[in-house]
Amino acid sequence: MLEFSKRTNTLEQSEYKYSLQDVTTPNFYRLLYSYDDVPKIPFNHRHVPMYPPERLWISDTTFRDGQQARTPFTVEQTVHLYQLLHELGGPNGIIRQAEFFLYSKNDRDAVDACRALGFKFPEITSWIRATKQDFMLVKDMGIEETGILASCSDFHIFNKLKMTRRQAMDQFVGIVKDALSIGVRPRVHLEDITRADFYGFVVPLALELKKLSDESGIPIKIRACDTLGLGVSYPGVALPRSVPGIAYGLWHHAGFPSELLEWHGHNDFGKAVSNAGTAWLYGISTANCTMLGFGERTGNTPLEAMVFEYAALRGTFDGMQPSVITEIARYYESDLGYQIPPMTPFVGEDFNTTRAGIHADGLLKDPEVYAAFDTEALLNRPIRVMVNQSSGAAGLAYWMKGYYGLGGRHELDKRDPRLVHINEWVQQQYAEGRSTAIGDDELASAIAVLEPELDAELRGVMVTD
């Protein structure tokens, strides 16, 4: 049969409908996933069209998936972080939803406290396992949308659930029907999708969900969960690892509109951000993230990175306030006791810090030489220089510019003779076996001893400016 598609504005064949393949022997894709070796990346050189949705969104699972990898938040901590999410997402609600556990009293109190703030975005949603007991929690709390776990690889269906594919599908569809019966919007989390039989289970399940959605008039979402971070964004890579293929299959073969599709990735192989961006480009509207990338094992897709990825792809933050990212990072360190790895993009202490003298020299002449964007304007994080054996006079001059707030006529030239003694002191430190960078306060104290007149001049600038 031929049908004219309004999405592609072309005639398309629609003769084949994917149906469940209820196999007796599980398909573990052993050629790819042999367990005693690195997972393989297969190519079939089939390319699917790039299909960026009209709207892109970010959703957050810090209070669900992210909380599984750390000490549980208190109610007060949850409320503060939720407020920061709201500020970061801006008036257009680009950070669309925040996902919560409901199992403990602390979880439920946190949900109530966040709802009391009255924010439209991020919308508060929940997560449950595919059981009727869990579903009653959602009903009792009055949550309008809930995630429902639906494990879709044979590793999970056969080895964890101890079911056949038919039994698993029937259970998942039954729970979704329960949600629809009382008007709750289901969001079906297709767990371990990058090890699943895409055409033998994933698409048939998605087609059943699409049918239920059409019949009920209630939108059902699908979250494609790359549970082990096995997704690959390379062109022409084969399923089940192909992120473009998964995105294309869900909107083209299963007929799900982009706004009802979500990507949830993990970072086991360092691909979380690129995979989430690829999901956006190939037809999935929402990238699911956590603050600072917290999550199981190596973590989830970092929310702060996707804020910048959004702006890079769309040319605008669309009202998002990226400086709030710095507030989030500082709160994690000051109030939650988490030490962010210093080189973490956007949030680490040293993400925009240089130690090389040649880099500092370039920064003195023009910050754009060694900085990709104005970190002070966007993140309230000025470029920093840490002084060590490689910094030289240029590094010292740039460090003084930042530490003392020098500007215009107050800036020091790297050829200023007063820097000679200071640089000699720095080099002596490392000649005597030092291996760490020199701290700000330590260097300032050394300047006061070595060049007291310069110290007085610099501190005078700090006071007057």
Image: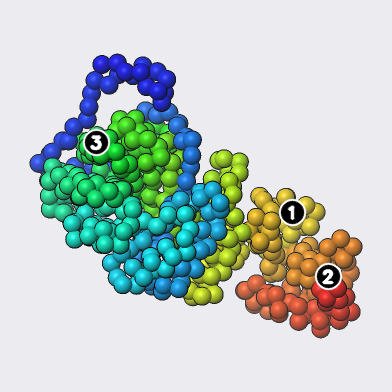
Q: Nearer the viewer, residue 382 or 149?
A: 149
Q: Which residue is mark 2?
A: 465
Determine the residue positioned at 31% across, 53% down. Answer: 146
Residue 345 in sight here: no
Determine the residue positioned at 38% across, 49% down. Answer: 264
Specify whether 374 is left or right of 20.
right
Q: Nearer the viewer, residue 300 or 352?
A: 300
Q: Nearer the viewer, mark 3 or mark 1?
A: 3
Q: Amino acid at mark 3?
A: Glu
Specify whether 393 is left or right of 188.
right
Q: Residues within 10 Å of mark 3 (few under 14, many from 20)?
A: few
Local secondary structure at mark 1: helix
Mark 2 to mark 1: distance in Å? Answer: 21 Å
Q: Amino acid at mark 1?
A: Pro
| Residue 341 pos. (x, y %) | 52, 66
Mark 3 to mark 1: distance in Å? Answer: 58 Å
Mark 3 vs 2, N-terminal side: 3
Q: How is the image coloured?
A: rainbow
- Specify the farthest residue to the left: 24
Q: Residues within 10 Å of mark 2 (few under 14, many from 20)?
A: few
Mark seen at residue 423: none
Mark 3 to mark 2: distance in Å? Answer: 67 Å
Mark seen at residue 215: 3
| Residue 145 pos. (x, y %) | 33, 52
Q: Which residue is mark 1?
A: 367
225 in relation to 69, above or below: above
213 in relation to 10, above or below: below
Local secondary structure at mark 2: loop
Specify whether 89 is left or right of 439.
left
- Specify the farthest residue to the bottom: 449
Q: Amino acid at mark 2?
A: Asp
